[in-house]
Amino acid sequence: MMMSPRQRWLALLDRQPTDRIPTDYQATPEVTQRLLVDLGCANEDALWRKLHIDKRKYVESQWRLPHHPDDPQADMWGVRYQRIDYGTGAYDEPAHCPLAAAETVADVHTHRWPDPADFDYSVIARTLDKDDGYWPIHSCCYEPFLLCGYLRGLERAFEDLVLRPELADAILGHVVDFYYEHQRRCFEAGGGRIHLTWIAEDLGSQSGPLMGLPMYRRFLLPNQLKMANLARSYGIHIMYRRTESDTLISVPPCASHGRPRLLGHRRSTTCSGERMLGHMPFSCVHHQPPDQVSNDVRHVA
């Protein structure tokens, strides 16, 4: 019997047989738009069905404010962005880092931080009430150090870990406090109908980790565990992103039984091989010639 994408994902996460390996999809908007046009699909749901993709359906809260209270050009963190065109698409890159000039912990505390109370969480319940049960449901992403780089500037964010650890602790503390309460409210609004969440930190470069294990364990791991245990308390599976090209999905009771070892050499990847699943991507850019994409896929396979 053919399974739906949700049935396929949940069976796999429960270590049960599936009719085939689930597939997933993530891409920049211009790639998705080109696929919609080239394949003649009216919407993304039709695209996933045509490509036999078991896409995760995202549900999220809605921010009630139009912009940062102190800066009409900034997002809720106070970061301003500039659209950077790379030829076949564009990205919004940070152009103003609101904590770039912070010198003391008091400066960090003075910054206007987002408030979880400024979000509408009922939209999650309403969306799920209308859900047809076909796609797996995903909500929330936690990637604090990337955000620190936006708030502080990436170079200063790394410097702080060594030269100004009290500033790094203060910034991360505010980020974690917001995300913990925000995600708690999201998960509560989901009413047990959210299947997956994302705990991410892209700490891999082309040649190795961007920070060593002691620094990772000092600044990032404790709060990753805190966020993981929050999701676990709602029965939600966790996608741990370790590098740009490697993600693990934890299966209960991983986070409560021990610390997932998420950074370092290949043996330092799981707390138990029986409780982790690999979410391994194939990456390409949309201007690659078809023959090159085909050859890359065969090489990976």
Image: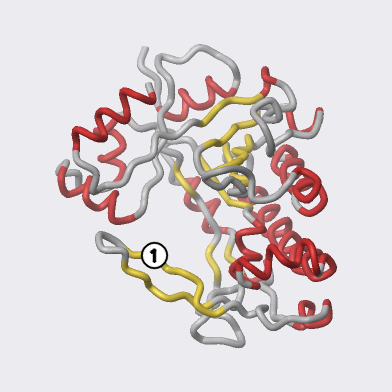
Give the left or right position of residue 160, taking residue 142 as reference. right
Disc 1 secondary structure class: strand
Q: Position of residue 90 (x, y in %)?
A: 33, 65
Q: Residues within 10 Å of mark 1 (few under 14, many from 20)?
A: few
Three-letter code for the amino acid on which mark 1 is drawn: Tyr
User: Where's the C terminus, which quadrant?
Assistant: top left
Using the image as rendered, state which of residue 120 and residue 173 is in the foreground: 173
Give the left or right position of residue 274, taking residue 132 as reference. right
Q: Position of residue 72 (x, y in %)?
A: 51, 86
Using the image as rendered, state which of residue 50 and residue 38 is in the foreground: 38
Q: How is the image coloured?
A: secondary structure
| Residue plotted at (48% across, 35% down) | 136
Residue furthest out toward the front: 207
| Residue plotted at (40% across, 44% down) | 26
Residue for badge 1 = 91
Q: Position of residue 91 (x, y in %)?
A: 39, 64
| Residue plotted at (54% across, 80% down) | 96
- Image quadrant assignment for residue 71: bottom right
Q: Is residue 258 above or below residue 226?
A: above
Q: Position of residue 229 (x, y in %)?
A: 76, 41
| Residue plotted at (65% across, 79% down) | 100
Q: Is residue 130 above or below residue 276?
A: below
Q: How many marks?
A: 1
User: Where's the N terminus, which quadrant?
Assistant: top left
